[in-house]
Amino acid sequence: MCILGKNKLMELIENYKCIYPFDYNLLDGDSYVLTVKEETTLHYLEHKNLISYEVVFTPPQYVAHLTAKSKYGRMGLSFLNAAKVHSGFVGRLALELVNLSNERQPITIKRGEPLMHIEFLTREGEPSPYMGPYQFQYVTEEEKKMYIPVLKKVFPNFDELAKTWLKNKPL
C-alpha cells in the first residue's frame, strides 16, 4: 500500500469524482482536506457527529484514511471514529468528535474551514466493496444519480450490488 501523491489524487478526483464538490485550494500535500456542512460549536466533553460538506467516493482499488488537522488536536478536539473509508463507499462522512480541551473552552468549527485530511491508499487483491447500511449517506437524490454511472464503470456487477446498497430504494 502507498499513499497517492497530489498528481494521482487529482486523477482520481477527475476520473471518479472521489471528492465532490472539489476545491483545489483544499489539496494539502498528499491529501485533500474535508470541511463540514454546517458550523458547529462543541462544548467541553460534548460529542457530536459532524457531516462532511464533501461527498466522498473510494474507488475499488483504494481505501481512504482520515486524520484530523493538528490545529484542532492542539485545541483538544478528538476524532473518535474509525479512520478508514472502505472501497466502494459513496457518501458524506460522519465525523465523530469530542471536545477534550484542557481549558474546558468551546471549540467552533466553521463551515468551509479545513478539518479532516483524507488520504487515498492503494490496495491489493480483489475488490471488496462496502456493503453496509451507510452507503449513500447524507447525499441528495441528484448526487446519488451523479454517482451511478461512476459505480457502473468501476463495478461490473453493479446491478447486484445496487440491490444491497439501496435496500429496495429506487435509484
Image: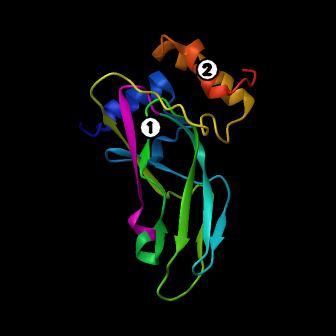
The 10 Å Cα crowd at callout 1, few under 14, some 14 to 19, many 20 or more, is many
Q: Which residues are magenta?
A: 58-72
- Residue 127 magenta-drawn? no
Amino acid type, mark 2? Ala
Q: Position of residue 6 (x, y in %)?
A: 32, 38
Numbered badge on residue 162: 2
Front position in the image: 112 or 151: 151
Q: Secondary structure at mark 1?
A: loop
The residue that mark 1 highlights is 86
Label 1 vs 2, first from the N-terminus? 1
Q: Position of residue 160 (x, y in %)?
A: 57, 15
Give the quadrant of the C terminus.
top right
Give the quadrant of the N terminus.
top left
Which residue sits at x=32%, y=44%? Answer: 30
- Residue 62 magenta-drawn? yes
When asked about the image quadrant of residue 111, the answer is bottom right
Front position in the image: 109 or 25: 109
Which residue sits at x=55%, y=15%? Answer: 158
Q: CA distance from mark 1 to mark 2?
A: 16 Å
Amino acid type, mark 1? His
The 10 Å Cα crowd at callout 2, few under 14, some 14 to 19, many 20 or more, is some
